[in-house]
Image (cartoon, rainbow, N blue to C red):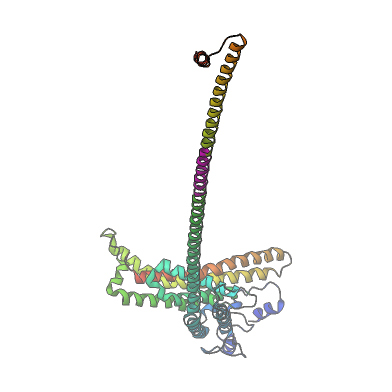
Amino acid sequence: MATEADAHSEGGLVFHPLDQFIVKPLFGEGPVAWYTPTNVTLWMFIGLACIVGVFALGSRGRAIIPTRLQSIGELIYGFIYKMVEDVTGKDGVKYFPYIMTLFVFILFANYLALLPMSYSPTSMIAVTAILGFGVFIAVTILGFVKNGAAFLGLFWMSDAPAILRPIIAVIEVISYFVRPVSHSIRLAGNIMAGHAVIKVFAGFAALTLVSPVAILGITAIYGLEVLVAGIQAYVFTILTCVYLKDALHPAH
Amino acid sequence: MATETHEAVGACVDAGGSALGMPQLCADWIPNQIFWLLITLAAIYFVMSRIALPRIGAVLAERSGTITNDIAAAEELKNKAAEAEATYEKALVDARAEAQAIVAAAKADIQAELDVELQKADAQIAAKTAESEAAIAEIRAGAVKSVTQVAKDTAKELVNAMGGTADAKTVTAAVTARMKG
């Protein structure tokens, strides 16, 4: 315990790359109960405020010739709408609001997390697991409601050789249940790793000898993270669309 | 000592405020994140499905409708312009044909008038010619008579001058015979 405290006061080469993910109460000290407003709450609500600003307030004018904010909203709307329509088909369009909700939440959380001193809710496995398992459970229920037992045809490759079909079915079932895990870990892992790596480089920046390299490294990783933030939001959304397509049209 | 500290600031943070292990896996914090995530998602879903998405969808539909209408209107105007041009061309052709008809009619009129005048003039000329011929014939007849008279008289006088007695009848006969010959 004493050595750790020394390391804090020393101000030398200290690495605490994961400290940025600590959940703290917004007001006062003390334990974090399930209802306590925390820094997670704050940054989720900042994201919510930005989303309301862009999509609700930005489109308030209902202008035929859009304002800048409105055209951003229209661009994202058109992008996700086309994705849902292309991947899931016409009958998937009625789930568009939920997919849009997921996309904008992840997109805004990822980009707001790139601000210095900010918090990244999408780096928390608890958050992405709720998103991922939410999609998984919803899609599975939807698949059975829409197709009944025919939904199990998703696991039965009718065009494979008869001997291989049971083996493929086992593999398909396993891969189906791994989906939500990979779906959520992919997002949290990418965001967490990027932010942790930036902190590690920042720790090296305290050494005069390597600080120019460290700062260049921070810049490069930051640029990469800007890409990752957008790509991970896109990947999460398009995978949601693919899973939804499997639920609506289980036949291979 | 360590356990005491942990109880004070939470199970996942050490005395210096640093994370113990991964904060992502700290069980104390998970319900809190889930609770606020669900609230945030519900709020985003509400704003999106009730306000933002219908509004943006309506704007996009209205815009594409406006564009379609404008294109249709432009098409209509283009057709109208083509129609007007066709009408203009037709009017031009009509006017040209009418002008040609007027020119032809005027030419015919002039020709008819000219013909009448020419006939009149020809008739006048013919009348004048006939008159002149009659006059010339008269003059010629008068001249022949005079010459005959002169020849008779001269012949009589010559006969007289030569000492003969000129019988008037003989002389006349002789002169007439001579003149015929």
Query: Residue, x 56% and y 11% (percent of image)?
Result: B165
Q: In this rendered view, identify the residue nearer to me: A124 or A250.
A: A250
Q: Is residue A186 visible?
A: no
Quarter assignment of residue A120: bottom right
Q: Position of residue B180 (x, y in %)?
A: 49, 15
Q: In this rendered view, identify the residue nearer to me: A151 or B59.
A: B59
Relative to A76, A205 lies left or right: right
Q: Residue furthest left?
A: A162
From what the image shows, is residue A224 above or below residue B2? above
Q: Which residues are magenta?
A: B104-123
From what the image shows, is residue B157 above or below residue A64? above
Quarter assignment of residue A47: bottom right
Q: Position of residue A86 (x, y in %)?
A: 42, 66
Relative to A213, A178 lies left or right: left
Q: Position of residue A176 (x, y in %)?
A: 37, 70
Total marks placed: 0
From what the image shows, is residue B40 above or below residue A107? below
Could you tell me what secondary structure mostly forms the magenta stretch?
Answer: helix
Q: Position of residue A43 (x, y in %)?
A: 58, 81
Query: Residue, x 60% and y 14% (percent of image)?
Result: B157
Q: Is residue B7 visible?
A: yes
- In what quadrant of the picture does the N terminus of chain B appear? bottom right
Quarter assignment of residue A209: bottom right
**Residue B172 shown in magenta:** no
Relative to A155, B24 lies left or right: right
Q: Residue furthest right?
A: A208
Q: In this rendered view, identify the residue nearer to me: A187 or B85.
A: B85
